[in-house]
Amino acid sequence: MEQSRRDGVSRRGLIRGGLLTVAASGVAVVGFAGPASAAVVNLGLDRQGAKRIQRWILTMYGYTGSVDGALGASSWKAMQRFLATWPSQPSPYKGAIDGVVGPKTIVSLQANLKKFYGYKGALDGIAGSGTKAAFWRMAYSNPAV
């Protein structure tokens, strides 16, 4: 059994909950303490929710990756393009379109989630439980495309 299984949490459970990211080096990083590059960052979405986001950004914001339910750098680049260019975006993303899910990306996402998906927290760049719940509402608010 894995080390994490002995602690009562399986690696699979962490991945499903969006809490485990795997860096390009293959090292697993639990939580979200800072920018995650070359990693899957689903922000609490299950595979189906992440696929819904990917299908949406595929049709609107130039996502060219596969619809696999893993929000990696290509997915986040498309999300950053959305956050930077959407006319009604309350706090447009002003960083590099690099696919890194850092504080600037999260703040812009939080502003969108606050305006349209019931996010009540601060625009602090930290993807906590409120951000994740609102991101889930965003993913499931529209019919699957």
Image: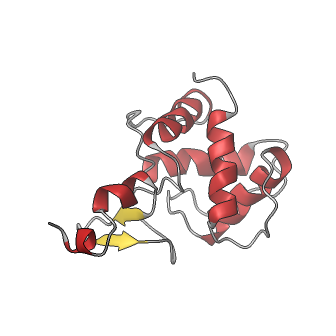
In the image, taking residue 69 as reference, residue 135 lies left or right, namely right
Q: Quadrant of the N terminus?
A: bottom left
Horizontally, residue 65 falls left or right of residue 26, namely right
Q: Position of residue 21 (x, y in %)?
A: 38, 63
Q: Nearer the viewer, residue 87 or 5?
A: 5
Q: How many marks?
A: 0
In the displayed structure image, the side of residue 15 where residue 32 appears, left or right: right
User: Could you tell me residue 79's position as x and y percent?
Assistant: 60, 47
Q: Residue at x 77, y 68 (%)?
A: 123
Q: Position of residue 100 (x, y in %)?
A: 50, 63
Q: Residue furthest left?
A: 1
Residue at horizontal 36 percent and vertical 72 percent from the top: 29
| Residue 114 image-quadrant placement | bottom right
Residue 26 picture quarter:
bottom left
Residue under the image location 71 percent in, 65 percent down? 107
Answer yes or no: is residue 39 visible. Answer: no
Quadrant of the image containing the C terminus:
top right
Q: Does any portion of residue 29 appear in the rendered image?
A: yes
Specify how the rendered protein is coloured: secondary structure
x 56%, y 44%: residue: 78
Residue 98 position, x and y percent, is 51, 59
